[in-house]
Image (tube, grey):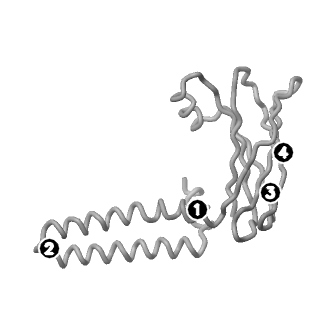
Amino acid sequence: METKITAFIENLIIYDYILFGSAFIFFILFIIIGILLRKKTFLAIFFILSAFSILLLAPTLGYVKLHQYLFKNTTTLTSQKKLEFTQAVVVLGNVVNESKSNFESCEITAKAHKVSKNELKNYIFQFKPIKKMSILEYDIRIGEKRSFKIIVEPFTYSKDYNISIGAKCK
């Protein structure tokens, strides 16, 4: 857990610090306004509840939306083939840099998950993949389309499955 927190902090960019700092400033501001309006109970409670919701929601939702905007990319699955004599699946795809800056690196992940006739089960199966493999691609320029190949092994699942791919770039 400590290594995940350290890695998260090391990968923060200047925009993240601005986002977290502004959320904290708004939290303090709304708390002060709530204290100043303590005679008007409804307004004071409203500002204090708003302050705590800003403290919790602004950094988390802001971080996700900020990174979706700054590091926008598209991954497409070109083909997938389960090998017959080897316990592996070969996944071919493309990643496109749609952001306004070059990517230093992209972690492209292929996940295999079970398939069911029940839509609710299919939704749940997406969160618990059977097998997951990742590769790193470096130096993807603005608008560049990069092809990749991921070999998911060992892949011993014999029933019906789906492959989903995604990329986290920075």
Mark 4–mark 2 contact, CB under 8 Å? no
Question: Which of the two marks, 1 or 3, is nearer to us in this view?
Answer: 3
Give the quadrant of residue 47: bottom left
Circle 3 SS class: strand
Residue at position x 79%, y 34% in the image: 153
Q: Is residue 65 above or below residue 25?
A: above
Residue 132 drawn at (x, y percent):
70, 39
Which amino acid lies under the numbered mark 2 shown in the image of this protein?
A: Arg
**Which is more toward the observer, 128 or 161?**
161
Q: CA distance from mark 3 to mark 2?
A: 55 Å
Q: Residue furthest left?
A: 39
Q: Is residue 117 above or below residue 27?
A: above
How packed is label 1: few (under 14 Cα within 10 Å), some, or many (20 or more)?
A: few
> Mark 4 or mark 1, which is nearer the start of the sequence?
1
Find disc 1 in the rendering and name its residue: 8
> Mark 3 or mark 1, which is nearer the start of the sequence?
1
Which amino acid lies under the numbered mark 4 shown in the image of this protein?
A: Lys
How packed is label 4: few (under 14 Cα within 10 Å), some, or many (20 or more)?
A: some
Q: CA distance from mark 4 to mark 3?
A: 11 Å
Side of 74 where 91 appears, left or right: right
Find disc 3 in the rendering and name its residue: 137
Circle 2 SS class: loop
Find disc 2 in the rendering and name its residue: 38
Q: CA distance from mark 4 to mark 2?
A: 61 Å
**Which is more toward the observer, 109 or 42?**
42
Q: CA distance from mark 1 to mark 4?
A: 27 Å
Instruction: Residue 149: give its label.
Output: 4
> Mark 2 or mark 3, which is nearer the start of the sequence?
2
How packed is label 3: few (under 14 Cα within 10 Å), some, or many (20 or more)?
A: some
Residue 85 drawn at (x, y percent):
89, 23
Residue 1 drawn at (x, y percent):
54, 53
Labels in figure, total: 4
